[in-house]
Amino acid sequence: MSITAPTPPAAGHAWTISRSDRTTRAASAGLVVLGLLLFAVPFGFRTNVVQQLTSLFILLILAVMWNALAGYGGMVSVGQQAFIGFGAYTTIFLTQHGVTTYLAVALAPVASGVLAVALAPLVLRLRGGQFAVGTWVVAEALALLVALDKGLGGGTGASLRGLSGIEPDLRRAFTYWLTLAFMLSLLVAVVVLLRHRTGIALQAIRDDEDAAASLGVRTAPLKFGLYVLAGIGCGAAGALTLANSLFIQPQSIFGVQWTAYMLFMVLVGGLGTFEGPVIGAVLYFALQNQFAEQGAWYLIGLGAIAVAFALFLPRGLWSLASDRLNLRLLPVGYNLLHRTGRSAGSSAQAPDGGTSSRGESTS
Amino acid sequence: MSTVPTGTAAGTVRAPTVLAGRGLSKRFGDLQVLTEVDFSVGAGEAVGIVGPNGAGKTTLLNVLSGSQRPSAGRIEFNDQDITGLRPELRCRRGIGRAFQVPKPFTGMTVLENVLVGASYGAGLGRQAAYRRCVEVLETCGLAGLANRRADSLGLLHRKRLELARSLATAPQVLLLDEIGGGLTDAEADELVATIKLVSEQGTSIVWIEHIVHVLIQVVDRLVCMDAGRVIADGPPGTVLSDAVVVDAYLGRAGS
Ligand SMILES: Nc1ncnc2c1ncn2[C@@H]1O[C@H](COP(=O)(O)OP(=O)(O)OP(=O)(O)O)[C@@H](O)[C@H]1O
Ligand SMILES: [Mg+2]
């Protein structure tokens, strides 16, 4: 038969499944330390840096949420700006009704989650292209509704009030801390999902919904849960964008350009990987700072790069590291290890313990 | 679980029926694909289904596994009506299914593919699911490829993965759809040994296969379908010598 060697002779205890190795343990510990250290940034850096980092973290939230939705759940939404805008305008609405500003920012994502719960029965019925268009239509409809509402400032926009009492540096630090806290919580939420069996179920749904169902996966509740999580995350990004810029307009906060940014970050970084969107967000942030002045050419450039990646490196920059070096930073995968091969340096080499099988085993 | 009755000829005691379709019909628009099909498989029994292309074999499996709803008729599993039950719940109750055209989760590794079946279909806890995966991967000769992404597999291994995944769900009845096509003799022998092993452990098997000489090494009973109807059902020897079957299928297939 065509597969040589890989099947070990006797059944039983020759194989083990492991999720972490030296690399993932070191990297996870490093990331936790880095996450905690980031809380200290406002003490050591100028306000400008703090505000820039806040923008970066917001982008990171968006990238991670869009990746969770499309890269893990297979739901390619073009309408997450509905939640971004809703989060921002809920914050405006709450502050107008006497809620303290930062409490309003913290509550807005919850409201966005409720919006997702309400929209889910409608949009999750749609598949593929219909889903994409459907989500976009919902976002445009919400933008129109808000623009018509005089109380929310109509089409001209609205300012976040209630922060004038706080000194600007302190205000920026508060916003930074809140953004960092949201970003870390959402990252942890995604890691927890991927550590749990839900992670493989979601990816199964993404790859083939019929096959997933025939293996016992209940697809509907999982897609629902992920859609709501992404709604909460994007709502947080919207509320935090408002807290960072203090002013919003319906056309821009509900604008489809957000989807373009998310697509860019996730496609360039690596769709369906944990590390990819983080890399994509950092890269996008750097590009934005360099080229945002170029206006339309900037957007065209982004589009061209995203298309180039989709064509030539469909699994993004991170796939270069993960495929060539077999590198994984977080213990969210599964490795079958052969007992004997285990001690022989488990981190960066072929994890199947049967390295020889790789080349020979094509059929 | 009761053991397989070796002879299913009239007169011998049949094992209790596990899965049965009664009066199943299926139409797609004007196309009548199944017409009042009665089909059943007993506990621990292995049934083969043969029939020309387009006879409705895959459609019968779709209806039994819940991927498609029958236009008429009912389906019973362990004497309970499951006609309206969703496919994931049928799987959890014990109906495993391998697709004719493999549907691997291409973005996941072979191990993760199998783990979906073990964690959800079989409902096992983490460690038990791991053990099940290792067992199944070894049985199907995939252990050495466990960490490969499924999209890097060739057709032979995709078919094995299809089998491994459905086995991982710990099915009481396993529905197999042409998992043996295009195999060399040695590979076919190995597949037969694997399915026999599964069958001996008490799992009921329903196996659609065009390669009859492979099929009859495993099955206790053979069903022949043509144009959406069951035209013969009985011991393999009897069915294969049936004039109607020879005319409908074997004659046409030229073997
Ligand atoms: N979803 C569908 N919509 C319309 N027609 C279908 C559908 N699925 C199957 N058919 C038709 O039903 C008939 C039976 O198909 P089925 O796949 O059940 O045959 P089969 O016996 O499995 O054939 P094969 O040996 O080629 O796999 C065929 O004519 C096919 O074209
Ligand atoms: Mg078929």
Image (spheres, grey):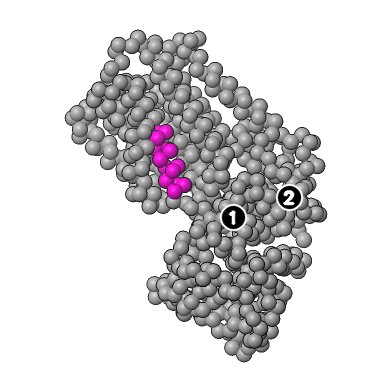
> To which chain does the residue with label 2 belong?
B
- At 54% across and 36% down in the image, what residue appears? A192
Q: Residue furthest bottom?
A: B243
- Image quarter for residue A66? top left
First in sequence: mark 2 vs mark 1: 1
- Kindly identify which residue carries mark 2: B144
Q: Is residue B128 left or right of residue A122?
A: right
Residue A82: image x %, image y %?
34, 37
- Would you call the spot at circle 2 few (<14 residues within 10 Å), some (14-19), or many (20 or more)? many
- Would you call the spot at circle 1 few (<14 residues within 10 Å), some (14-19), or many (20 or more)? many
Q: Nearer the viewer, residue A118 or B200?
A: B200
Dot 1 amino acid type: Ala
SS of the residue under disc 2: helix
Q: Is residue A321 left or right of residue A190?
A: right
- At 36% across and 46% down in the image, what residue appears? A120
> In the rendered image of this protein, does residue B78 appear above or below residue A303?
below
Task: Give the number of the mark in front: 2 or 1.
Answer: 1
Tell me, yes or no, if residue B182 can be seen here: no
Boundaries of the magenta span: A221-235
Residue A176: image x %, image y %?
43, 19
Residue A237: image x %, image y %?
40, 29
> To which chain does the residue with label 1 belong?
B
> In the rendered image of this protein, does residue A170 appear above or below residue B21?
above
Q: Is residue A93 covered in magenta? A: no
Dot 2 amino acid type: Gly
Secondary structure of the magenta portion, mostly?
Answer: helix
- At 56% across and 41% down in the image, what residue appears? A196
- Kindly identify which residue carries mark 1: B122
- At 63% across and 56% down in the image, what residue appears? B168
